Image (tube, rainbow, N blue to C red):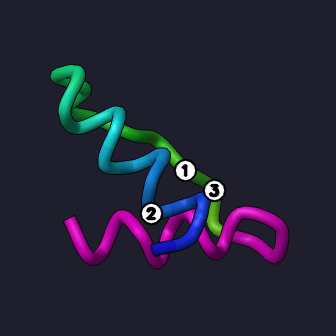
Amino acid sequence: MNGATALINTLADCGVEFCIANPGTSEMHLVQALDAV
């Protein structure tokens, strides 16, 4: 597990249901983690 996955899992555990992202270079780890949830 990396930091992006931990962050996405924490947000999901806290009830966050939506994430608006503009995929690019710096946030691709977060976008990839979103695919796994």
Residue picked out by circle 2? 5
Residue picked out by circle 1? 21
Q: Is residue 21 left or right of residue 18?
A: right
Category of crowding for the residue at label 2, using alpha-carbon neighbours closer than 10 angstroms: few (below 14), some (14–19), many (at least 20): some
Q: Residue 12's spot in the image, x, y percent?
A: 23, 38
The one nearer the camera, 22 or 30, is: 30
Judged from the image, the secondary structure of the residue bearing numbered disc 3 is loop
Rendered view: 32 above or below 16: below
Rendered view: 2 above or below 9: below
Total marks placed: 3
Q: Is residue 16 left or right of residue 33?
A: left
Q: Which label was assigned to residue 22?
A: 3
Category of crowding for the residue at label 1, using alpha-carbon neighbours closer than 10 angstroms: few (below 14), some (14–19), many (at least 20): few
Judged from the image, the secondary structure of the residue bearing numbered disc 2 is helix
Q: Name which residue lies at 60% across and 59% down.
A: 3
Real-space Cα separation, disc 2 to disc 1, in angstroms: 15 Å
Q: Is residue 8 left or right of residue 21?
A: left
